[in-house]
Every structure is written in C-alpha cells, then in structure tokens.
Amino acid sequence: EFGTRQAEMFFASCPEPKTFQSCSQSSEDKFGAACAPTCQMLATGIDCVPTKCESGCVCPKGLYENSDGQCVPAEECPCDYAGVSYPGGFELHTDCKTCTCSQGRWTCQLSTQCPSTCVLYGEGHIITFDGQRFVFDGDCEYMLATDDCGANSSQPTFKVLTENVICGKSGVTCSRAIKISLGGLFITMADSNYTVSGEEPLVHLKVKPSPLNLVLDIDIPGRLNLTLVWNKHMSVSIKIRRATQDALCGLCGNANGNMKDDFETRSKYVASNELEFVNSWKESPLCGDASYAVDPCSLNTFRRSWAERKCNIINSQTFAACHSKVYHLPYYEACVRDACGCDTGGDCECLCDAVAAYAKACLDKGVCVDWRTPDFCPIYCDFYNTHTLVGENEYQYAQESNCTWHYQPCLCPGSLGSFPDTNTEGCYNCSQNEYFDHSEGTCVPCAPPTTTLPPTTTGSQPTTETTISTEFHSSTSANTPVAPSYLPGLPTPPPSALE
C-alpha cells in the first residue's frame, strides 16, 4: 500500500495541462487513466474497453495524447504511412489520390486524371498499364505503347518501341534498345546512351541524365504527359497521364482499368494466348515469330539453387516494409528465371536488375529500401569522385578527389510523399537532404522531414506544412540548365532538340 501511495505521489506532479487521475480517490471516471484519450485511439477507431482502474496523467477533455506525450487537439494528431509519421493537415499525393491527415486518419480523394505505368524489365517481363503480367522472348522490334490505334488518331502520335538482342544458350535477351517517336522527333536509348534527332514543335522534351538512370519527361500540351525511366540496360518504365481518353495499344495494353482485355492485338481483337498477342505487335512482319519461352531453370538445373538463394532477398526481412504494399512473389519468380537464364556472363547483372525492379516498385509506393551492400549488387559511385569527364563517355583520373558523390537508394527519404520529381536510386553529388533540380540546375533542399513531429502545446495553431504536388508538370523552357558535375558520361542534347 505504501508503494502504491508513493507511486501516486510521483505521478501526481503531471506536466501541464495533464491532470492526475487516482484510483484511490473517488472520481467521476471509476477507471482513472485506463482509457485516457490518445491519438492512437483516434487512428485505429477502436473503442477502449477498460478492465480495471489505472492511476496516471490524463489530457484535459477535448485533447489527445500523441506519441511524444503531448496533449493536442484531434486535428493535430499525426497519421502514419509506410512507417513515416505525418502531422495533422499534411497532404500526401499518390498516383491516383490526394490524402489529407485528419484527426489521426487519412481522408482521400481520387484525382481526376490517374496516371498509368507500364514496366518492361529483365528478360522480357512486362507489367501492363492495367497490371497484367507476362513474359516473352523474341529478337524483333516490338511496339510497347502508342496512341496510334487506328480510329481517329490525332497528330502527333507517340510510339515507344523495344528491340531485343538475344544471347545465352536458353535464348534470353541480353541487351535492349528503346526507340521513341513523337511526330518528327526521334529519341533512341541504347548502349547506355541516348540520341535525339528531328524536331516537333508541339512536343516539349526534358532530358534528365544521371550515372545510373535516364529520365525523359515528354509533354504534349492538352493531350498527355509521358515519363520514361531507363536504367541504361534492360529496364524501362513508361508512365502516362492523359488529358483525353485517347485509345492506347501495344504490349503495354490499353490502360482502360481492366487487365482482362490487355492482350488486344494490332487487329483489334483480344488474343487467346500471349504468343499471338506478342507476335501481332512486331514492327516487321519479316521478323520471326516469338515462340514459347522455356523455363531457363529447367535447362540449367545446376543454377536453380544459386538463383533461388540469391533472389530470396526479395522475400526476406530486407524488403519486409514493402511486402504489404507490393506483392513480392511474382518479382521473386521473375528474378529466379532471369538468374537461371543469364548463363553466358552478366549473371549478376541479371540478378541485380531483377531485384532493382522490385525495389523501384516499392519506391513508387512510397517505401524506400536500402538493399545494396558491398558484396551484393554494389554501385561504384566513388568513381566519379576521382575521375573527371574529358570527352563523350571518356574519363580521366583526377589528382584531387572531391568526395561529394555517393549512392542513395532514393531521394529525400524523409519526405517521399511530397517529393516533386521522379524518384530513383542512383549516384548523387547533392547532400542527403537535397536533390538535384534540373530546372534550377542546382541542388535544392528536400521538403521538411516528417518522421518526427514538432512538440505542440494546448491552444497553439494546428501545424501546417507547405506540400508539393507530385503531379508532373513538364517544363516549357527552351533550354534546361544542367549542372555539369551531375552528368558524368552523358552528353546534354542541344537546346534545339529539346523543344
């Protein structure tokens, strides 16, 4: 009894504005502090059912205790998303929704224009705009996506083509070229580089090169925005936001929200199997048809255990934070297939590309995973600290090193929800709380980190933060300033080619 009284005396000195609720005294609440109002209760929406009285400090009526022990009004209670805490009133922009943190919960509204993303990676793995998955092997040029689908096509139409080069005993693809045409403007991405030729006055193009990725932002005002991210090897993603519901077609599907009719052929009927669908989108009829892809692990059984062991990182604790956001099993199976198939060199590159594809899918859902290590798919960013660019893709060892280049699994990890640009892993020479703004040509600060909430007191104004929409708005300036130190090994196209 003495110990209980001592504990009550200790608790009785509650920090303002909390008051002490004792079980030994008669009070209007016979359960004391057992069900004191907290922000967590607001967030879960689950009513607290007390079983016994507990003594303790309680917030005044109308206020709720947050994770820092502060008493705040309901509108200042934080919300959690992907392991990050956001303050009350914060707006989070995802691909199709704008969500506002209100009284510990997210209230979301659908955006009027939802972007769709198609991904081609590894040995011919495609995830269509509507989420259908398939894999194909073929050494032809194929139409990935176009709005030139026959009926009432208005100029300029866009076309995105992929050309595969086959190698390996099991017939896997070992290199890939991506070709984009927009009216009279042509862009080719191949052999870790890109070229821009021709011009099209109605198209605004912004090129954002970096050591690991190449990002193209393409805007046709009043019609569509395209963002292409290429890893300079086998992976490319195409994100499209349309102002009008023009038809789309190609291997990436029709982006109508229904994955069941994605295998629509060039002749406008839904194919009964993947091969018929794939072969209908060959650019040249003289090119041989793709055939059924044999599972490379059945041809290279000795490699299966190695592939499964290495690819298991996708199923492991490393990616645990992402498993609830992006289903991991299809990415694991694709990884095993690719790791088995790359049997004539480049096996680690195939493995790393497959794991990186899952990491990018996680990042697109707001989960940044730092998965690379010095002995698993390392990225050698330190090269750019000790070498300077002296010609096109030619480097010279520098006597003095500047030690500013470093690897980052994503940009602005503390404020992913408000990052205004395309977020990719890479080698960067901005500090870790900055990102390179291509329109400004300089490093700019990330939005304020939102992992910790500033302490608030009773009666203070609700916390407000300036949020930056992640919707893509293409630049219309004729010349995009670029910091030379940001572009090792990639020439900047002439201004005339960009607009």
Image: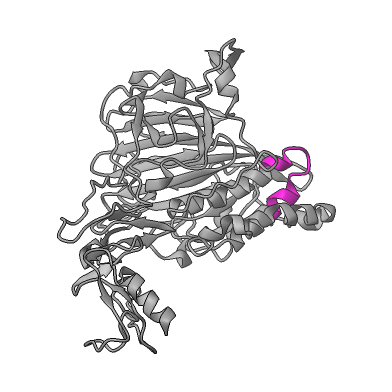
Which residue sits at x=30%, y=83%?
Answer: 32
Which residue sits at x=34%, y=60%?
Answer: 68
Question: Residue 346 colored magenta?
Answer: yes
- Residue 222 drawn above or below residue 498: below
Residue 4, by quadrant, is: bottom left
Find residue 159 and report its horizontal and vertical position in percent: 43, 41
Report the front residue among 115 and 465: 465
- Residue 464 drawn above or below residue 73: above
Which quadrant of the figure contains the N terminus? bottom left
Q: Is residue 412 in view? A: yes
**Residue 100 relative to residue 309: left or right:** left
**Residue 243 relative to residue 451: left or right:** left
Type of secondary structure dominating the magenta stretch: helix
Which residue sits at x=73%, y=44%?
Answer: 342
Find residue 263 and report its horizontal and vertical position in percent: 50, 60
Highlighted range, magenta: 336-349
